[in-house]
Amino acid sequence: NVFLSLFVRICCLPSSAASESCDNFTDLNLTHCFIGTILYVRLLLYTRSNLECGRELSHHHLSSQPLFNLSRPTAFVIHGYRPTGAPPIWIDHLVHLLAEQEDMNIIVVDWNQGAANLNYYTAVLNTREAAQNLTGFILTMQEEGAPLSSVHLIGVSLGAHLAGFVGANLKGKIGRITGLDPAGPMFTSATPEERLDPSDAMFVDVLHTDMNSFGLRGAHGHIDFYANGGADQPGCPKTIFAGKSYFVCDHQRSVFLFLCSLNRTCSLTGYPCSSYSDYLEGRCLQCEAFKPAPCPVLGYDVSQWRDTLLKLGQTKVFFSTTATLPYKKLNYRVDMVTWNQYLRWGVVYIRLHSGRTFTEARIDHKLLRFEQYTSTRLLAQFDEDLQPVQKISMRISTGNVIGPRYKIRLLRIRFTPLDHPERPLMCRFDIIVEENMEVAFRPLPCNSNP
């Protein structure tokens, strides 16, 4: 009976369902990588009506593809070097999140046969040929009525440069290219024609997370986001004993930050600045050039700042993250006016308390100077958003372990919530801080001075 029931369920399916099969990303293994693979590009189409089942597109006969609607915008997802040949773990997640943004064609550019090779140089060479292939497909789209301005290329690592080559082939008329940590090896001394650059599309946005290893240093878009300075990412291993994660964690973080931004669970605001050190020192916490719009936010919607960015030229923006989802830090600008008899140097630790819970910011990237009647601005970044803030405690650590403890007088300290401008500023006036000792106080409205 069981076998009969199973036979009936299989054989009595509608013919379309019985014959339906999905086209999946090419799954290779280390054997293929040792032998080497010959480039072959597959284009897998996903739409809101077939998110769970990709359809491989013909490179030439687009009219025969009923799911491919050229009146919709089209996003191409382009992976990078695949040293093991396995499919990227993030592909399905990215496809689903892109479909949530708007009704679009999502095409996964599967060039795993060509990217899977132990010889990285071979994969780099294959990006040019793969770009020619993809360029031909997009030209066919254009011939059948799709405007180039409706095309968005999302390239990861080596895929970012592949996207740039496609854009250059099409004279920069592609609507947008997003580069997620463009590959650095073999591109560090490349000219703009030999890598991703702003002229490759009408709008180019780039995210950097691993510039000191697998990523590319510098600025390569109309806007470049630098997560935690663009190099070492929090939570990633610092020693080789962690194995594979030591090599890929920082580089892959670009994809996970982009996924998080698409999921709307993290709003990662970038602050325009000339350097990461200036950003950490609180010198770049306003977005005057972007008014009346706020500072640019990483992700799919960053294109709303396109016109402003095109006027400004290449813009660098910096932001900090936590080690885990939702990655967002809570930012406060802290302004202090000090009045102390002796010059002191130190680092600052600030805690926000709500009930029995607290979160701490360590401002220890450099020694700060505290002297008589000096204004000091700090950027304090907390891992949690505690509300309401009932108490604030702080410690100025000078490293002085012998001799008398000097006192630092704060005539005023003001906390400005950067991420929530609707929240009131918090102040306190005339506080005595003994070096290396924690002092706690209740914040007051800034218009009061007891």
Image (cartoon, rainbow, N blue to C red):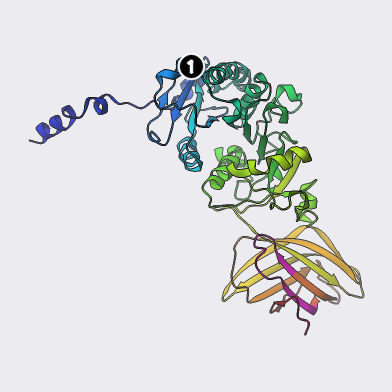
Quarter of the view holding residue 56: top left
Quarter of the view holding residue 198: top right
Q: Determine if residue 230 is in view.
A: yes
Q: Estimate how packed mark 1 is, as few (under 14), some (14 to 19) or many (20 or more) residues with alpha carbons within 10 Å.
A: some
Residue 180 location in percent, x, y? Answer: 62, 36
Q: Nearer the viewer, residue 251 or 171?
A: 171
Question: In the image as oriented, which residue stretches furthest toward the left?
Answer: 1
Quadrant where the C terminus sits is bottom right
Residue in the image at 63% along x and 57% along y = 329
Residue 4 location in percent, x, y? Answer: 9, 32
From the viewer's perspective, tell me whether residue 99 is left or right of residue 353: left
From the viewer's perspective, tell me whether residue 310 is left or right of residue 75: right
Three-letter code, disc 1: His
Q: Nearer the viewer, residue 386 or 113?
A: 386
- Does the segment drawn in magenta span residue 76? no
Quadrant where the N terminus sits is top left
Residue in the image at 65% along x and 76% along y = 391
From the viewer's perspective, tell me whether residue 336 is left or right of residue 204: right
Identify the magenta region: 415-432
What residue does disc 1 label? 59
